[in-house]
Amino acid sequence: MEPIKRRKFIDLSVKAAGVFTFASMAGSSLNALALETDSVAAFAFAQIPLPYAYNALEPAIDALTMEIHYTKHHAAYVKNVNDAIKAENLTYKNELEFFSNASKLSAKARNNAGGVWNHNFFWESMHPAPSTKPTVKLKEAIDKSFGSLSNMKDEFSKAALAQFGSGWAWLTIEDGKLKIGSTPNQDNPLMDNVAFRGTPLLAIDVWEHAYYLKYQNKRVDYINAWWDTVNWEKVAQRML
């Protein structure tokens, strides 16, 4: 994988600036705050404000699922990873550095860091009134890599459905080529020791808490409905 360039990752990494920085819907999908640890400002993870109301993605994702997912699951990951950062005296400067050293992290730091980042990315991957098709440039990249948008969606859905247990399915770009794969638990393609690596463009959460209240064990129905929420403009921005 080629070195990650900062200008290509404005959605993926920000520097700790000593303040809690929120992103707008069109802004960064990553946020950081500074914690004072032994008088040294240490990077920590933060939860972005949800870019829409809890019920905004209905009928694909119901309001109660969204509220619990955001206020309970996601918020818990934030608390847990920042507790780990403080307890373990971790001194990484941003998310990319954090994930580039995932193989050195404790299970608590790794799993919860992934939980925060993945969900921030996931919320911004969806929109209440998304464009029905990708931008021209994104569509060209999809056609080049998969033959058609329909083929890409089929392959992505299969990856999401086939992920055993909890995890994520991803659309990534590497060396100019789009790829599809999955990661278990809260791993993501930026981590240094995962099998599927690349620059994330799109993700779906297939943990049961993401869909069970509405879809029970019918993951395939959740995946099919989720396509109606995909924020294609955001996906295209992540290619830049």
Image (cartoon, grey):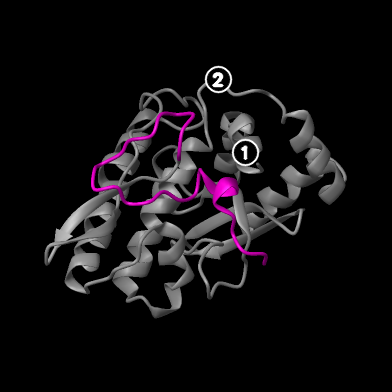
> Is 82 on the left or on the right of 205, as rendered?
left
Instruction: Name the residue that disc number 1 marks.
Output: 235
Neighbours of disc 1 within 10 Å: few (<14), some (14-19), many (20+):
many
Instruction: Name the residue that disc number 2 marks.
Output: 129
Residue 221 coordinates in the image, percent (x, y): 58, 40
Residue 59 coordinates in the image, percent (x, y): 49, 25
| Nearest to the observer: residue 18 or residue 112 | 18
> Is 56 on the left or on the right of 112, as rendered?
right
Q: Which residue corresponds to the image point at 36% horizontal and 24% vertical from the top-left? A: 53
Residue 51 included in the magenta stretch of the image? no
Which image quarter: residue 89?
A: bottom left
Residue 200 coordinates in the image, percent (x, y): 59, 52
Label placed on residue 141: none
Q: Amino acid at mark 1?
A: Val
Q: Is residue 63 above or below residue 169?
A: above
> Is 43 on the left or on the right of 211, as rendered?
left
The image quadrant where one finds the C terminus is top right
Q: Amino acid at mark 2?
A: Ala
> Is 134 on the left or on the right of 30, as rendered?
right
Task: Tell me, yes or no, if residue 163 can be seen here.
Answer: no
